[in-house]
Image (cartoon, rainbow, N blue to C red):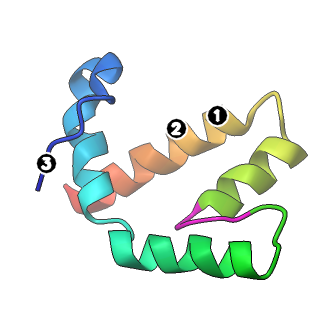
């Protein structure tokens, strides 16, 4: 599997970001979701947990990034 170099700006958290990407949705499943959305003329197509991020950004625009950061910390504690 090819490494993701676009996450390098995150510094030490890049390795965790890469690991999360590897555990995420498969490319074929993502492609199917996107193609189904295009066929159905869906205005917004969400792959993996995109719906959650979009909903939080719309409901709590000033603080959703803090919620996501807290979620990531809790998730990391559970896996350690």
Q: Which mark is residue 69?
A: 2
**Is 57 drawn above or below residue 1 in the view shown?**
above
Residue 26 visible here: no
Q: Residue at x 52, y 67 (%)?
A: 48
Residue at 78% in and 42% down: 57
Query: Within the magenta stretch, is there residue 30?
Result: no
Label drawn at residue 2? 3
Alpha carbons under labels 3 and 2: distance apart: 26 Å
Q: Quadrant of the N terminus?
A: bottom left
Is residue 10 visible in the rendered image? The answer is yes
Displayed quadrant of residue 75: bottom left
Q: Which residue is mark 1?
A: 65
Instruction: Find the magenta span and give its range.
Output: 45-49
Q: Name the residue nearer the viewer: 70 or 43.
A: 43
The mark that comes first in sequence, 3 or 2, is 3
Does residue 5 sit above or below 70 in this rendering? Answer: above
| Closer to the camera in the image, 59 or 50 | 50
Classify mark 1: helix, strand or loop.
Answer: helix
Is 48 within the magenta?
yes
Circle 3 packing at 10 Å, graded few (<14), some (14-19), many (20+), is few
Whether the residues at callouts 1 and 2 have beta carbons within 8 Å, the answer is yes
Mark 1 or mark 3, whichever is nearer to me: 3
Relative to 32, is 21 above or below?
Answer: above
Left or right of 2 in this view: 48 = right
Q: Does dot 2 land on a helix, a strand or a loop?
A: helix
Q: Nearer the N terminus, badge 1 or badge 3?
A: 3
Say what secondary structure mark 3 lies in: loop
Residue lying furthest front: 39
């Amino acid at each position: 599997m090819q490494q993701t170099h676009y996450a390098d700006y995150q510094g030490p958290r890049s390795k965790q970001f890469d690991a999360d990407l590897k555990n995420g949705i498969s490319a074929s499943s993502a492609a199917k979701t996107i193609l189904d959305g295009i066929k159905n003329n869906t205005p917004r197509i969400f792959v993996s947990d995109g719906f959650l991020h979009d909903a939080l950004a719309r409901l709590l625009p000033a603080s959703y990034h803090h919620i996501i950061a807290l979620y990531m910390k809790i998730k990391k504690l559970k896996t350690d």
